Amino acid sequence: TADYCVARDMRDCPRDALHLVAGAPQGVSSPLLGFVEFDDQGYLRKPVLKDQLVRHLGSLATARPLLIVVFTHGWKHNADPADGNVAAFSQLLLDLAAADAEGCANTPCQSRQVVGVYLGWRGLSNRLEPFKTLSFWDRKGRAHRVGGDGVTEVLAELAKINARDRESRLVIMGHSFGGAVVYNAVNQMLIRDTAFLNRDRVARNVADLIVLVNPAFEAARFNAIQRKASGFTFVPKQKPILAIFTSEADTATKRAFPAGRALSTLFSEHRDARQRSQNIRAIGHYAPFQTHTLTEKKGATTASLGEFACAWQAYSRGDTDHWAVGPVALNRMAPPDSGSRRFNPYLVVRVEKGIISGHNDIWGEAFSDFVYRFVAVQDYRTCPSASPTEAAPTDAAPTGASPTEATEVADERSARQP
């Protein structure tokens, strides 16, 4: 800890490329947090700082596995220490560190270090109204530019670090236009991966998980992946690759976004009404692409992470179409006899307004709890009823694993090679 500045307030450590986030529970390693910023052309504001950050993480990865969590903010936000997203992301890292410590206890990943990388851009380009709101069209174009250039470079370098250790994980998150930044950086790689099925599974080469919340990009950008996925026969235990969560109460992407798109595409050619609708509506509000719902669950009881993980395993096997996480539940919209759609790794989730009450309300307790548990259980294989020899929350095949289970682990390992 003496090697890092310790940030107890977001204004601390102004000159450090990487610092410790204070506030971790006793016995839990404090997460690290670093920043990478971009200008309107997608250029790195300070390439030297980015290089220092990547080199340091690469060095750290030689000593211990990492859980790297990347976050890209949205419209009207930036990387200012006073921006609420900075503090909220730091708290999410603290929650993830606690959950990961619980999940990795007495296993090969128990030394894993949680690291946050905050990607900043000029989502807030003007503080005066009406210019602040009228920046919608300009900021959307900038988001795609930033994602297509600088962010792609950073994510590729972090993926290379992630591939060094089988216990390391890379999770990429984006909100609002930050979701557009992330998606623009990864969508071509995601489409490419659909051409290389391995035992009817799509490999997670870009990241271990990509989570977009209230993303502000049109459904037409998702058409290629949706079309490919609809033709596959996915098998049980296919792990999620991309999860898109959009609140029913997100008026920014539900009303303002299509209004803006209708104006900007006024003279664009569309072959039919469906294509026009896809080009105007935000991805989360285009009903034909929706695959899941996230609903409030009454009478919820508390449970350990191991119990949530056990329930996730039943969900991923197809034993159930509901996964309850405290006060919320993830539900497949497709009926039980719908075949491959049950295990589609590209989730488009409609979220009830009681969980996310608006466009910017993404850090509420219910949704934050769901997100860090959703991340934590992906590679956690221990059930509360499992014997010590059956417990193996790692990439190693569980003791006594069946040939099928061993093959699944081998497939996942091969997909993680650089």
Image (cartoon, helix red, strand yellow):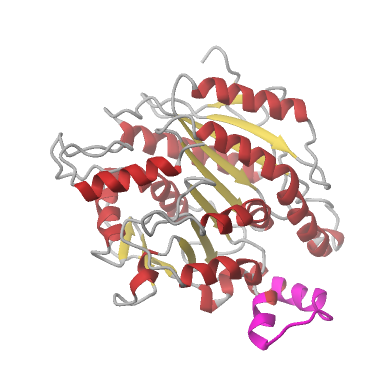
Residue drawn 68% across the image and 53% down it? 181
Residue 7 visible in image:
no
Closer-to-camera residue (21/332): 332
Residue drawn 31% across the image and 43% down it? 409
Q: Main secondary structure of the magenta part?
A: helix
Tell whether 381 sits left or right of 367.
left
Tell whether 57 sits left or right of 17.
left
Above or below residue 385? Residue 284 is below
Residue drawn 44% across the image and 28% down it? 65
Tell whether 324 sits left or right of 292.
left
Residue 165 visible in image:
yes
Choose top left, top right, bottom left or bottom right for residue 156. top right
Magenta-span inclusion, residue 271: yes
First to last magenta residue range? 257-278
- The residue sitting at the bottom extreme is 273
Above or below residue 72? Residue 284 is below
